[in-house]
Image (spheres, grey):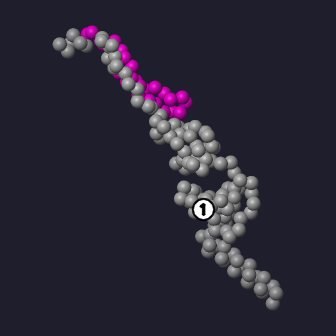
Amino acid sequence: MQSFVIFTTTVLLAFMLSGVSGGCTEDKNKYCCTWASKGYCSNENYREYMEQTCCLSCNASESINIPPPPETCVYKGKHYPINERFIPDDCSGVCKCKGNKGFGCVSLCPPVGMKCKPGMELEYYRQPVGDSGCFCERPRCKRVDKNRIENNN
């Protein structure tokens, strides 16, 4: 009778866990338990990542104590350490991770006002931004081509 109770309890527990976790059998990150204990599973900023990566911990009633991970920010699916400056793949700005306050971004290519002297005209060129693969359109003055002016008259 005792072996039947142990077998039944084991089968029932396995069935309950598979139902609760949707068939999830393991977490994909060693910090999942810690993140789950901090409420990341229900935080809208982290929910999708946690459901995919930490399904077991998000559905467990207790978590194991694991040293907390370094604080990071998630921007468009990528993790960045606190105070790290980064340029997103879409070149939308220069951003900085601010920990649990999220991140802040400023324009990658702030506007530049420029007025050219007489005999000069404004032209734009593409300036690389470091090794990011991004470019900014920048103004510069160049001498007016006299032949072009004479042909236009």
Look at mark 1 in the image and give the residue it sits on.
41
Identify which amino acid the numbered label 1 is placed on. Cys
Where residue 118 appears, x then y in whole percent? 30, 12
Q: Residue at x 56, y 48 (%)?
A: 102
**The image quarter in which residue 26 lies:** bottom right
Q: Residue at x 46, y 39 (%)?
A: 92
Where residue 132 appears, x then y in whole percent? 53, 33
Q: Is residue 110 magenta?
A: no
**The image quarter in which residue 13 lies:** bottom right
Q: Residue at x 71, y 53 (%)?
A: 68
81 relative to 20, above or below? above
> Which region is colored magenta?
123-147
* Disc 1 crowd, CA 10 A, few/some/many (<14, 14-19, 20+): many
Where residue 100 appears, x then y in whole percent? 60, 50
Looking at the image, residue 116 sits to the left or right of residue 128; the answer is: left
| Residue toward you, 133 or 96 | 96
134 relative to 101, above or below? above
| Residue 79 appears anywhere in the view | no
Q: Is residue 135 magenta?
A: yes
**The image quarter in which residue 55 lies:** bottom right
Q: Residue at x 56, y 40 (%)?
A: 96
Where residue 110 appears, x then y in whole percent? 44, 31
| Residue toward you, 91 or 147 | 91
130 relative to 147, above or below? below
- Marker count (numbered): 1
| Residue toward you, 118 or 149 | 118
SS category of the residue bearing label 1:
loop
Residue projecting furthest to the left:
153
Quadrant (top left/top right/bottom left/bottom right) for the N terminus = bottom right
Looking at the image, residue 58 sits to the left or right of residue 119; the answer is: right
